[in-house]
Image (tube, rainbow, N blue to C red):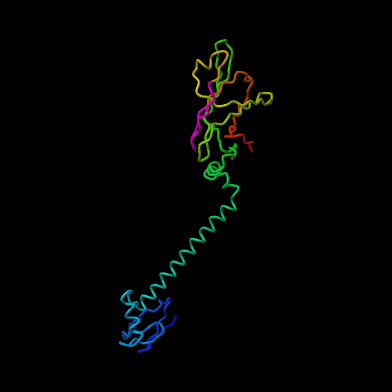
Amino acid sequence: MRIVCPECHAAYQVGAIIKNAILVCHRCNTEFDTYGNKIVEGNETAEVFKKQEEHAPTFGVKDLIQSGMRSNKEQVWLWMILILLALIFTGIAVQWEHWKFNSITRAVSIEIDPDAPILDRDWKIIANTVQSQWLKREDGSLALVIEGQVQNLVGTALPPPEIKITFVTQIGQNIEMVAPITEPADLNTLQKVPFISPPVDKTPVPMLSTRGFLLLIEDAPQAVQHILLHALPTQRKSVAPL
């Protein structure tokens, strides 16, 4: 907005106007209102502004310009924040197939929905921890002992999974079996015949942590070429796995 001093006709470009403010010309020090009317001591306009000055400070043109600049900067920052949020939500929407399996996203969905299923991809067998060996038992028979660690990949605690074991024999035959993770067993327990399995481990695995497992397989085929392990999620309720 363009304002002209009524005394010396100096022109000022003001970005914002404060209603009922007293403007002071920087050239001749004349006081005038926002409509360009000169304020003379004793007239009606001066009396109005005099009362207002008792409760509010006097603003000059420089103050008004700075006020407008601050207002513009605040608007710019607001628009930048809104644009940034829009870009973030757009990116999440486009990449939702990836984001919905993110550790945090999975944790939120599991926490807010008691019936949300635990997925296979919520668990991972740590390959470099897996070991297997044949154990000679009290009656002279052999049993296969498999041990390793499984990792919870979700940002919330989960019940321990079961372990699916696939034996690939030398003739290409696949033999599969599923064993639960039990509480730790000592060597004497493993060697006894018949083998009495310890209780199933029901202690939840904390978020993003690991749980060790030790499995004894009495009927494992001896002509084994490869052993494949896969974690099968244990559901918190009667929820059909995906």
Quadrant of residue 238 in the image?
top right
In magenta, the rendered stretch is: 198-212
**Vertically, is 93 above or below 215?**
below
- Where does the image place residue 57, in percent across and percent down from the top left? 32, 75
**Residue at the spot 48% in from the left edge and 35% down from the top edge:** 206
Q: In this rendering, would 163 be left or right of 13?
A: right
Quadrant of residue 193 in the image?
top right
Residue at the outermost top position: 139
- Where does the image place residue 169, in percent across and percent down from the top left? 66, 24
- Where does the image place residue 208, in percent across and percent down from the top left? 49, 38
Between 109 and 148, the residue placed more toward the observer is 109
Quadrant location, the C terminus? top right
Q: In this rendering, would 86 be left or right of 220?
A: left
**Vertically, is 86 above or below 37?**
above
Whether residue 205 appears in magenta in the rendering, the answer is yes
Main secondary structure found in the magenta portion: loop
Quadrant location, the N terminus? bottom left
- Where does the image place residue 156, in percent across and percent down from the top left? 50, 39
Q: In this rendering, would 210 be left or right of 23?
A: right
Quadrant of residue 5 in the image?
bottom left
Between 228 and 56, the residue placed more toward the observer is 56
Between 58 and 45, the residue placed more toward the observer is 45
**Vertically, is 178 above or below 77?**
above
Whether residue 169 appears in magenta in the rendering, the answer is no
